[in-house]
Every structure is written in structure tokens, then in C-alpha cells.
Image (spheres, helix red, strand yellow):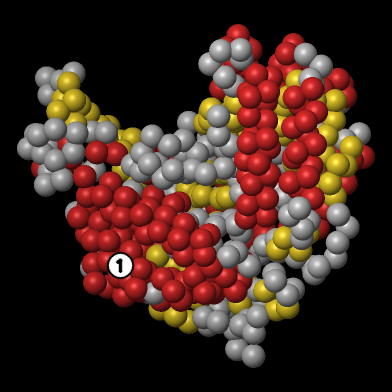
Amino acid sequence: MTAEPILVAGQWRPAAAVDAYHALDPSTGMPHAAEWPVSGWSDVDCALDAAAAASRELATLPAVRIATFLEGYAARLEARGAELVAAAHAETGLPRSPRLADVELPRMLDQLRQAAAAAQSETWRMPMIDRQRNIRSAAFGLGPIVVLPPANFPLAFGAVTGGDFAAAIAAGNPVIAKAHRGHPGVSMVAAQEVVEALREAGLPPATVQLLHGIGRGDGERLVADPRVGGGAFTGSEAAGRRLFAAAATAGKVMWVEMGSLNPVVVLPQALAERGAEIAGELATSVTGSAGQLCTKPGLVFLINDEAAKRFVATVTARFEAVGPQVLLTASGRTQLDDAVASLAKAGARLLVDGPVDAGPCCRPPSLLDVTGEAFCATPQGFLVEAFGNATLLVRCGSLDELCRAIAHVQGTLAASLYSTAGGDAEAARAVRPLLVARAGRLVENRMPTGLAVTPPMQHGGPWPSAGPPFFSAVGMPWTLLRFARRICFDNCQPDALPPCLQDEPPAGRPWRFIDGSWLHA
């Protein structure tokens, strides 16, 4: 069988492969027919040279050309939306509707169009001008960006379709994308449209390149290569730490989004007033998409009064009613099995954990609980990410014990607090700062799953959930700053200045900080 081609320097060509793989249909566990090459370093080296040349050319082009590419590319992907959804469904098992067709596809297209608007306006550059001293600065692209996507969002976080890709391109960087092994066909369909969209916009052909696989050692070598400006990775903490460390040794920017426990705190009065409703929200949040969301709640803290006991009984019944769910990969199921076993070994009690074997990628949800006292005694045994349809309830004896338990939680993407304005007000004041200190996003009276793609959104958090913690993977235009650096032009000649720093504003009319005031003119 002939392996699928790779996209390097604007050309589809055979890979100099060192291995190959087949994506699986997780619904059946059977491999798809297409064979995907794992490239050796020679392919990576060619892509790096082409990306470096494209980066130099992109730096000379007006921002409107990049915006034109992103808009045209979004239109082309929209025209092939049904094909993209079909490919994503076949490779991930995620439902066509509503998940892929009605949620993820529109989000993907919206992100690309938001990125186009950000690229054209250039406000994200935050141009600053001191006319008296003739000192000017703004943000500019880093250079070639390596995009390493996750398994769980084949469209909205895809190698050549997702938010990292869109933000890197909008900031003026070429992208070297490595398709995820779980959904290479999705990236292939999309990349076919990349070639035409680049040509129509007049961008360098190597602005976007696609490899289907690279070896682990070559991945670490890639993100540390002198020709690379930076990288973006979404996935497991173990892989993220390796890539982050490799990039750091070379002084390279590496944005990583890794494991996250996303604690939920439910205070007593909220439980007493609407415990059954919250139980339903928790079950939906943990089992929706089989729990394979980076914002899925992995820890639920509550004070163990009578309302809490009723809540646990209701949640248990809701979990038992779900049955086996399709996970993205067989390895994902194995890792989830291991995580649940680790929690049980540490002392958590299994409330729901059906041993149903419905296929290599299928698994029923798991619900566990532990006392606050046991949690505080050996917290590391319970701070385990069970990525998938599992969560741990921490039943505390008092508000003081609940606060002590929360204090053990590491950095996380999101945290939720359920309370009432009346009876829980004092407890909420004690809990809220503990959650804010650990989370990039505080959610009140909703679960942390469900994330609006809007400029003020923060989808990042303290280490180890993500790094560096200031940045966000969602929220144009600020997410572009992950792939940019600030450059100061001190006493430079007017004709040497980028358009956004010249005395006359560029066509996009960005907001600029001039002599102490933000101006839009």
C-alpha cells in the first residue's frame, strides 16, 4: 500500500518515512485503510528550510494578505464542511450532530474568521509611540510555529484548522503542522484547501506545511531547532513537559496546554436548594463527549451533610444510567483505566465503575469518592487526571477541611463554584480566592465545560495546566500574542518603521498608544 503524501514547500510529495500507521475507527476498534507515513528528519529539515524562507517573505507583506488567506480558507472549508464532519466522525467516533456539525465545525470557521479580522485590524500588536523621544514598539511574529494538536477536537483544535493554527498565521508566522494520529484524514482534507487558499491570497506556498507523523525524538529536536520561532502543543502532561523542556534548552517559546483537574466546589445551601439539578449538570459535564474535554471536572468538593448525601446518591444513579461510551482511542481507554485504578489504590471508593467490555475504545463512566481527611493526608494520590468519563467526589467534614483540601490542588484551566447569594455568601468568600489562585478561569453556578470563543475568554492557567500562564489558547486577538515578540524601534528613520508605527495610521486603523493616550485614528 502506498502511504499518503506530505505537504512540504507547497508540494504534495512522498515522505522519507521511517514508519507508518493506520488511524482507527474507535467505534469498532478496526483500522482504516489509509496508511500514513511517519517522516524522518530529512522531511522535517526540508520543511524547516521552507518555513524559514516563507517567514522572511511574510514579514514584508501587508496584513491584509494574511486576512485574505484566512477568510478564503474558511470559505473553502465551509464548502467542504460535510466531508470534514464525515472524516472527523469516522476517525474519532464523535457524534456528527450536534458535536461535530453543529458545534465544532461552526467554532472552527468562526475562529478562522476572528483571526482574519485580528490580522487585518493589527490592534493585537498594541503599537506604542513616544513621538518626543522617537521611541516606538509593537508585537511581531516569532517565525515558523510548530503546531502539535490534541486528539479530542479534530476541527476546532486541528493541526491546520484549529485555534493555534489560526492565531499563529494571523500573527504573521508560517506553520509546520503535525497531524494527530487519531484524525490524520481530517487534516488531509483541510490541507488540500490550504494550497489553493494560499495561492489565491498570494502568500508563500510554505506558509502552511503538513507532516502526518514524526518520531518522538525528532519532535523534541524540531521545537528546539534554531529555525523555529515557537511551538504550540495540546495533550498529555508527560508529552507537554518533554516538549516544553526541549524548547526551553534552546530558549524557544513553547505554548503547552496539558492536564487539568478543573475542580468544582458545591456549597451547602446550593446543594440544599438545587442538588438534583446540579447532579444532572455534573453527570452531563463528565460524560458529555465521554469526558474527553480539557475542562471536564475531575474533582468535586462538597461538605458532607444530608443534602450532600442525597446529591451523591443522585449523581450515582445518573452515572449508572449512562452505559458504555466510545473513547477516542484504545490507548486513551487504557490510560483512563490506569488512572481510575490509581485513584482506587490511593484509597478512593468506586461508586460506579462497570466492567463492561464493549470494544477496545469503549468504557462506561466511573464515579469515585473519598473523604476530605483522606484527601488531605495524601493529596498526591488523588491529584490524578483521569481524562475521560470519570470524576472524584471529595466529601469534606467542614468548610475548613474543604478549604484545606482545595489548597492542595495544582494549577488548572478552570474552576467552578456553586453557591447561593444568601446562605453560602460567607463560605463563597472563603473559597473564591483559593480557586482564583489556581485557575485561569473562574465559573460560577455552571460547570467548567462549555467555553465561549470570545475575546475576553481565558483558556490557560497556572502550571501544570498550561504554560506560560499569562496566555490563552482561546480569545482573539490576545491569543495571537503567544506567537509574537515585542520589538522596539528607537530613533529609527520613518521609512524604516513598520506601518503600524508610522505617524500616519495604516489602512487597518489599529488602536495605538500615542504619547500617553490610546487613539483610534
Q: Is residue 281 at least partly visible in the picture? A: yes
Question: Given the image, on which type of amino acid does mark 1 rest?
Answer: Ala
Q: Is residue 339 at least partly visible in the picture? A: no
- Which quarter of the figure is the N terminus placed in? bottom right
Q: Residue at x 41, y 71 (%)?
A: 81
Measuring from the top left, give residue 48's x and y in whole percent: 46, 62
Q: Nearer the viewer, residue 60 or 423?
A: 423
Q: Is residue 371 above or below residue 338?
A: above
Please tell me how crowded label 1 is: few (under 14), some (14-19), or many (20+) other residues with Cα within 10 Å. Answer: some
Q: Nearer the viewer, residue 485 or 300?
A: 300
Measuring from the top left, give residue 384's x and y in whole percent: 77, 39
Q: Nearer the viewer, residue 509 or 423?
A: 423
Q: Residue at x 46, y 76 (%)?
A: 83
Which residue carries the number 1 mark?
75
Q: Secondary structure at mark 1?
A: helix
Q: Quadrant of residue 78?
A: bottom left
Measuring from the top left, give residue 353's x and y in whole percent: 85, 50
Measuring from the top left, give residue 159's x and y in whole percent: 50, 61
Q: Is residue 472 left or right of residue 491?
A: right
